Amino acid sequence: MTSIILLSIFGILNLFVGFMKSKKVLMPVVLLFLAVALGATMFDWNQPQSYFSNMLSTDNFSVGFTAVMVLSTLFILPFSRSYVVAENSNLAEYYSLLLFALVGGIMMVSYENLLILFVGIEIMSISMYIIAGSDKRNILSNEASMKYFLMGSFFTGIILFGIALLYGATGAFYLTDIAAAATRMDPATSPLLLMGLLLVLIGVTFKIGAAPFHFWTPDVYEGTPTVFTSYMSTVVKTAGIAAFYKLMSAAFGGVYDQWFPTVVAITVLTLLIGNIGAVAQTSMKRMLAYSSISHAGYLMIALTSFNDRSENALLFYSLAYAIATIAAFGILKYVGDARGSDDYTAFNGLGKTNPLLAFVMTVAMLSLAGIPLTGGFFGKLFLFSAALEQGMIWLIIVAVLMSAVGIYYYFRVIIAMYMRDAEGERIAVDPLATFTLISLVVLTVLMGVVPGLFSNLL
Amino acid sequence: METTAPAQYLPADYLPIVIQFVAALGFVIFSMVVTHLIGPKRKSAVKHASWECGIESKGDARAPISIKYFLIAILFVLFDVEVIFLYPWAVNFRALGLDGFVWMLMFMGLLLTGFFYVIRKGVLKWE
Amino acid sequence: MELSLLLIKGLIIFAVFGITLLIATYSTYAERKVAAFIQDRVGPNRAGPFGLAQPLADAVKLFFKEEFVPANANKFLFIAGPSLAMLTACMSSAVIPFGGTLIIGGEAIHLQAIEVNIGILYVFGIVALGVYGIMIGGWASNNKFSLLGAIRAASQNISYELAMGMSIIALLLVTGTLSMRDIAAQQGQELFGISGLNWNIFYQPVGFLIFIICAFAETNRVPFDLPECETELVGGYHTEYSSMGMGLYLFAEYVNIFVASAVMATLYFGGYNFPFMHQLGLPHNVVTILGTVVLFAKIFFFIFFFMWVRWTLPRFRYDQLMNLGWKILIPLSILNVIVTGGAILLKAELF
Amino acid sequence: MNDIPEVIRTIPLNYYLYFSTALFCIGIIGVLTRRNAIIIFMCIELMLNSVNLLLTAFSSYRSDPNGQIFVFFIMAVAAAEVAVGLAIIVMIYRNVRSTDINILNKLKW
Amino acid sequence: MLTALIILWPALAALLVLLVKGDGARKIAFGAALVELVLGVWAWINFVPNASTQFLLNEPWIANAGIMFKVGIDGISLLMVLLTVFLVPLIILSTAKHRYEKPSSFYALILFMQTGLLGVFTALDAFVFYFFWEVALIPIYFIAGMWGGENRVRVTFKFFIYTVFGSLFMLAAFVYLYFQTPGTHSSEEVAFYQLVLDAGTQSWLFWFLFIAFAIKMPVFPFHTWQPDTYTTAPAAGTMLLSGIMLKMGIYGALRWLLPVVPLGVSQWANVVLVLAIIGIIYGAIIAIRQQDMKRLVAFSSISHVGLIAAGLFTLNHHGLQGAMIQMLSHGVNVVGMFFIIDIIQSRTGTREIAAMGGITQNTPFLSVTFLVLLLGTVALPLTNGFVGEFLLLMGVYQYNAWMGAVAGLTIILGAVYMLRMFQRVMFGEKNEITQGFTDLTFNEKAVLVPLVVMVFWIGLHPNTFLTISEPAVLKLLDVIKR
């Protein structure tokens, strides 16, 4: 809650900071804001509280995911340095939008009432629509923005209709009330409830970019400026999946049997489409987009398993995934800017020209692929364990096979970097970004060597 | 405060609005039809061209216009909705008391901040 | 609703409608007369005594003109534009209470077409729709002047609508209701021992000032008639219109003036109430009828005021207009709301 | 205003349900079949409004104001969405002089 | 603590090496590997030869899941640790002639890999085992991929995907087993040993685990990555792969397959044995037809590993002990063979058998060491190969006489292709590429002499090593036969 208020105020303040002559001051200010917000979030740790007549509550679940999101933003921002240098006239606005989106995200992870969920989703989505189009002169960015907007608001409508039906069926927006009503009445005989649940499910599936409503992801990711793409694929996705999990556990935990087959089907489909789609890409950015789809699938395994392990697994995986993805996108931004292309070929010989970038990228890719020594491995291990405890062997077999497919496309980057000849010059990276990249690697390896530090937080 | 409004509304209570609507529509249709019927009709290519002070008209009139107008429209949508939120508050102002006032002050504060931002941003600067 | 009541309502509606049209018609005449008076001329004096038949002659002339649609205009929208403008103008008078209650045969009859408890919102809703009439007409013409005029009109209208809404909110703080009838009735109470003088203008002078300025802008009257300023835009949004299309636009403007005057009179100037209305000891029905007369007197005054201003003040420049709307009126109206709210709370606290 | 719910309740709940579902479906079909961004956008708004209607109906039938409060939020959010949406459409229009989404094919689906 | 030191030292040294530029990297890496050798020997000296696990380290790793970072050394582990710490310095030394690009990365990766290998050999917890299993894979991927020969990208990628694919199944099996353990679950080795699972479960678990190990060894028909990878990788990489990494698969099967799912093993042992024997014959026959020396050794390796696998799955004392000792011998021999091939290649610029001849004439030292190692490989009595293969064949024979007979062909066939190679390469007429062939340098001798010593040590006094592993193997057999 404190973080919501703080970030809102900071967002507004930041808009006014933007009126200063020099844009250089923006980045430190925003980083400071985020650090303060992160600190404030941590104060709520182990101190569950609820606000606004229980419409919003902070518990360790929400604090954990809030921390992941704020931290991710903190890590993403340094890569936007080139925008600062370019004296982008709307930079303050974009930063503020990121902060506002973060507010929306925090609402999405700490809601107790569907109203807050809806408002959170919208605050986040609307900010992201603009962010997607922030490269105003670039037709690709325009298109991404438009697609995201049309699709996003369309699915918002679907979520809303679902919420309305749920309200009609249960008479409540509070998760606890819905849960009570859902268990009281036999869901199989209540078409209103089932329909509502299905529609909400569809909408949220879209928001996290899971199949079969994933089709916007590659396009939007490709068109959006890279730094913001990394925000989308980490913060937005984290918020979405956490909200999804909370919805399913707090409101529909009692009717698990009703939605379980659907969610499993979505998970499997997402895994297949994400991974196989990624294989076919030649553009690194699109590959990362598909990889984000596939990771949505892995994250959804937590939903299908749905036991006391899965929450922790979800948090761990989100963090590991976010860190690796930020590193990947951060490097992609530098490489893309310097070599004028987002394709794999742009990475050729990076190991020779920029050993540090190549090394960080390698660690990020290994983490995304789930190879040990990185956080991604334990993320996958925990998720799979949670599902296996539930006895879902077939799901895990699919997931394991798809992880193997994942290795194929993640390693293409590594191969390009180390085993092909260099085509470009050394790429200059500013110190702040270098520092960030190193911290990302340290964090990833830390998660991969002593996972115990992060694995039992909730 | 004495209330003279009827105690209960039924859909039929809104019938007068329909009557008024029908009356107004009738008047409009009547006048348009009558003028259509009794007015003269002489066609000519020059007359049917768009009027541009007698100069030959060029291009499509529906060309993009200054972005400022769009900004005004967008701002309106936002502010108007905020204003709508004030109506229920205003009506129940006395019931809500000081708390309501303080909340609304915060709301207004945010609104004004946004407003101030928009002005500083130069959205309302017309050359 | 019983049939008899419905009939009475129907009667009132048609009466109001008729009066609206009549007043609007004669407003054109009045306008020219006022203009003439201010400019020291005679004004229309040929048709009928004192030129009183002039509006009718104008109307007949408009009917007989060629109904002209430009070649590359959108035909349907071109006709829909003025129709919509007129339609919305005529609809908005429905909720205005033109008087108190007449008691006939023990049955109380309200001199109001329709009572809805959200009357003010109704008026605003309908008035806001009026923008569509102008916008559609201007766009459908496919003429650069028309389009520019229409866009100016639209942005002007919406800009001032904000300040107007805000000023109304301050009023609502005082009244606590959205019903026009209730608001009118409240103003019949005593102030300083004088009945029928509890007018809102005494509580909301600033609000009224804002409201009237906005009303000028909403009706596209001088000094806010930029959408049709002939020096820049020929005829503005109705450049391409002729015959009744043109007629309806002009007509709608006068209807709007009438409605705006009526709303101002009702909201701020006591409506049908007049000082000492209950102290004179007159029978109820007489008071009611007197009240209606008084209301119309107030309305006429405002209509006159509209014309007075038109022939007195020069037109704004567009940037001045926007600055006035956004940078002065809106902050002022918000301030007004806050001060009003604070004052009411203070009063409740102290007394 | 306590009586409005009673007015609403004179019509069976199912009618509201059918009506708003119909509106919603029209919106969906519009989104899926039309090719003009503005029309798609309007169809989305139609969907939102059908939800508003449904929520109001449910709210009245349950004598629970929460549903209507939700409607308020939907309206506010929809306004923000309109603002952003229009801005995006204008941005695109100024770049490509069209609002037909078929023009937007630089990114493959 | 000693175990932790043994595991972590190479990783620390790797970080150190990364900081050094140029040729210094190799020297520091070599020094570090020698230190590691000392540590290994120190462990050997302090090792009490009985069945218990020693130098135990047991720290909570993922506390809430009951997963411990548990490592320790018993007889089986010790042999593997010794093999690793013995071979790595030699491998580093063997690269002296090569001028690799970015040497610091190269040597750091080798040391880093050593950490992974030692972790695998000492892990006493399934997840720790899996962790190091994959950790060992990453460096070798980069070594082969970055410094390899032509086609390295495709080949190493195939190798990586293959192995990871297999090991993911192993992971799934481990997670499953983890959840079968009672109470607050545990993934420790002993906990797995105590599990009693029904035959059906064990049956599929067997395949899940077996695929991972079979790919690593590799057992026919999972071997297809191997010849290409061996051929393409740089000499040091090939030595690491064949000398040590291959043993990971055998060791894994010994530790995590046989005792965990004994019913599954007994159910499928026949199939595996048949596969292994097919591998023996197949590898040998293909080897005979090879023209490329490196490929020839690669296929011979398949053949030899097939025998070890066969011995393993006989589940008797001889088989297991034979496997243990043969792992050592094979490590020593194959590293030596590859090194000699590397020497020949670096002097002549080719590995074609047909292109060479007459090398013996000016290289007495090389010829002798080559011959010794070669004879070790073909299991001549008194050499190390003989001890291992004898025990293994005995084990297989005990299991099934026919199988033993067919498996015995390995010695004959091995002699055919090995001696044929030796004869064509070393004898005959000199030609222009072997004209200026010089004998071993000091560095090369330093590598080859210890290997030759080991060939005879194991061959003449195998009990030095057999006694180390004997109690542990017997204990393991008890667990299997439970």
Image (cartoon, coloured by chain):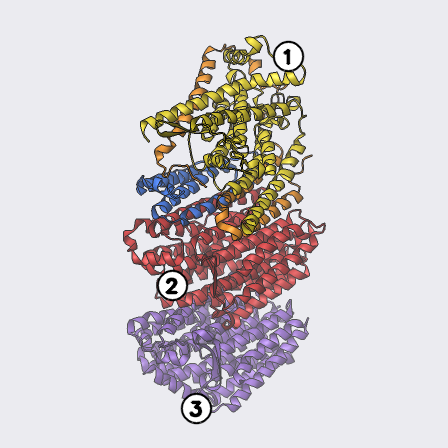
Chain colours: A red, B orange, C yellow, D blue, E purple
Dot 1 falls on a residue whose secondary structure is: loop
Label 1 marks which chain's residue?
C
Q: Which residue is mark 3?
A: E50
Q: Nearer the viewer, mark 1 or mark 2?
A: 1
Distance CA(mark 1)–CA(mark 2): 91 Å
Q: Compared with residue B76, is residue E357 higher up or lower down, i.e. above or below?
A: below
> Are callouts 1 and 2 both on one chain?
no
Is residue D88 something that shows in the picture? Answer: no
Q: Are marks 3 and 2 on the same chain?
A: no
Going by the image, does D60 lie left or right of A318? left
The quadrant in which residue A420 appears is: bottom right
* Residue C42 numbered tag: 1
Query: At 56% from the left edge and 51% from the top edge, which residue is drawn?
Result: C350
Q: How far separated are the C-alphas under marks 1 and 3? A: 130 Å
Nearest the eye: B55 or D48: D48
Query: Dot 3: within a 10 Å radius of its alpha carbon, few (fewer than 14), some, or many (20 or more) residues?
Result: some
